[in-house]
Image (spheres, helix red, strand yellow):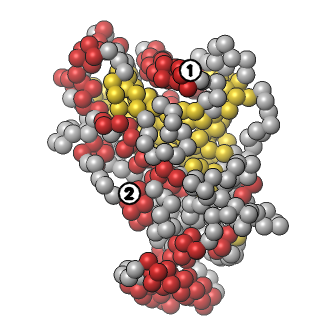
Amino acid sequence: MKTLLRFRNRKQRRYSTGDFSTRQHQLLHCHEDLTKALELEDVVKPSVIGLVLGGGSFDGTTISSLFHRRSSASAASTCTSNSSTAIGTSRAARQFLRHSSSFLRVADLGLADDTVSLDSGHTAISSSVTDSPQKLNDNDNNHQTAADATDHANFAYPHANPPPGVDHDPRERWVALDDGSGSHAPIAPLAVQALVKAGLDAALDQSMWTQHTSSRYFKAAPWHVFTWPTEGQPATIPNDEVPAPGDKIEDIVLLWMGKFQHGLYGSDLPAVRAVGIIPAAPKVLYDMLIDSDRVKEYNKLSLGREDLLVLQNGGEENGPFGKSAVTKVMRSKSSPPLVRQTMQFVSMLHAQELQDKSGYLIVTRAVTHPDDDRSDTSVLRSEILLGVNIIRRIDGDPHRCVMVNMIHMRSPMVPMIIANRIGASAAANFIRDLRNACC
């Protein structure tokens, strides 16, 4: 074990300087040395392996940093130090089953950088492998093993290799959320952390949004300014800025329209931001939204929502996805009016309390899942490209909260010409339905 720790300290010093080509060469040797070091140990403790591979847990993001900063650092540089992995007691023991895994798009999250990985070996390999899906297709046994690092694409680092059944796009990047056996993939906590950052950045970037609601409503609801990041602004919403309970102004839902400028999948579609006051304690609303059994309480068109894969259930104090966080893959179905087909969403949901206790955060994004039968024409598959719910406390009012909802969705049933109108109506109705469910 001493050999292993000496290896880690020596290698950290070695690849901290130098240009990329030199660094890549050093990292390749670093991976070889790690292999040799592991071979010297009859038993390697998982905690030490996690330390060597840069293990850690996702601590979440404080509301003060969310509302008081506009960092220019990329998600990659922010997230690298918090990556998490669980290889187990043997490098050869873990298998990655592509056809049994769920996959998440990450090209817009800043994770395609060659420096983003779980350890030096994966970083070096991700810089040298080809983007060709043919080279990275499943092997004859339809699995990838931790012993063969060249097969770690998607599981240990993002790659253009698409999930089974999805067309290859060289600009896209994918990560696996799980290993196909119920455990999270090594890259998954890092990808979720990057999704959280991307979602918050979008929901709180005022320059991205244009007012959609009539300006007279914005004048009547000045408290909406506290949903934007401002230097010196309190984390919670000041009580004297919101209308009294029962006031008609309390029912106002404010809407903004925006577009993503990354030029990647779905950037041609509009996004909607909605803000409203919900007559419920923040924790009560949070618990209702993450509970799949309670969807019909606020969505009358819902045919139900089921959890397909639970990566963390909220009971883990120091789980890989954050303290008491919930991370899961779920499938929801609804029956929209005037449409004969059932609308279906398969998405990942990640939920957590904000670290400074000022509220809660829920982010969602579409994923592929092995149980999704794409040949079923009775189902209209739609995608939540990015969904964000920020639930913020009102200072001194434990029975109400302010909801910031951002939704970016793709549905084949919505023509582009009316996407703005349909999206705005759906976002406003979501806030109103929550109000009715909580009254």
- Residue shown at 29%/53% (left/top)? 71
Question: Front-most of 220 and 361?
Answer: 220
Rendered location of residue 273, percent (x, y): 40, 29
For badge 1, the amino acid type reads Asn
Question: Front-most of 438 and 28?
Answer: 28
According to the picture, the residue beneath numbered tag 2 turns out to be 74
Residue 240, placed above or below residue 45: above
Say which quadrant the C terminus sits in: top left
For badge 2, the amino acid type reads Ser
Q: CA distance from mark 1 to mark 2?
A: 36 Å
Q: Is residue 202 left or right of residue 30?
A: left
Q: Is residue 356 left or right of residue 239?
A: right
Image-quadrant location for residue 161: bottom right
Asked if the residue under mark 2 is in contact with the one under mark 1, i.e. CB atoms within 8 Å, the reply is: no
Question: Front-most of 242 and 160?
Answer: 160
Rendered location of residue 247, percent (x, y): 28, 10
